[in-house]
Amino acid sequence: MVSSEYERRIAARFATFDQDGNGYIDREDFFGAAKALLTEFGVAARSDKGQALYGGAEAFWQGMAGIADRDGDQRITREEFVNGAVKRLRDNPDRFAEIARPFLHAALDVADTDGDAAVTVDEAGRVLKCLGVPEEMAAPAAAELDADGDGKVGEADVVPAFARYFTVPE
């Protein structure tokens, strides 16, 4: 049985996706996150990196909708999100990671200002803020992603952490 505490935590994470605060998640929330990232890092939407980010946002949206949009209205309510995350992803965080991977890969590429396939902890914090993480939590969360302490965060650090955040109750 899934605990109500777990459901409360997952429900609180709903706000991270609901970028415009209208009470549901839709494609525009994913595109809004992409636009915020492009603006933050000064990357043009029509550039290769910008197009990859929008493509990743669309793939992420399609994956989330496939898991959680039970009524097919192209919007995910808080209840659908909680039920989708709890019932379909809790036991398989790797599935969530694979749904998120194209977007996260492209987001890291946008933030990677020196082209070394990793971002600094500061850049990771900026990405997290663009994705809706409160400013006071973004820097500490980004620092936590740097497991080896080298000051860099790569896809291997981000994707599993992202999946755990949305699927594991702790």
Image (cartoon, rainbow, N blue to C red):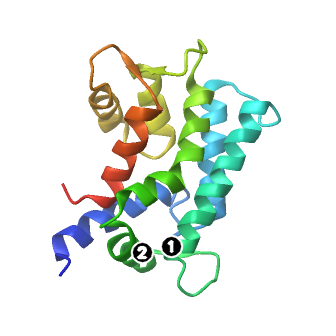
Residue in the image at 47% along x and 23% along y: 123
Query: Mark 2 vs mark 1: which is more N-terminal?
Result: 1
Query: Residue 111: x and y, percent?
Result: 57, 26
Q: Badge 1: how crowded within 10 Å, few (<14), some, or many (20+)?
A: many
Instruction: Determine whether label 2 and label 1 are within 8 Å by CB.
Output: yes
For the C terminus, give its image quadrant.
bottom left
Residue type for callout 1: Ile
Residue of label 2: 84
Residue type for callout 2: Gly
111 relative to 68, above or below:
above
- Identify the mark at residue 67; answer none if there is no mark: 1
Whole-number angstrom distance, CA of label 2 to CA of label 1: 6 Å
Residues 20 and 31: in front is 31
Residue 155 is left or right of residue 38, and the answer is left
Q: Determine which quarter of the picture holds residue 66.
A: bottom right
Query: Residue 121: x and y, percent?
Result: 39, 21
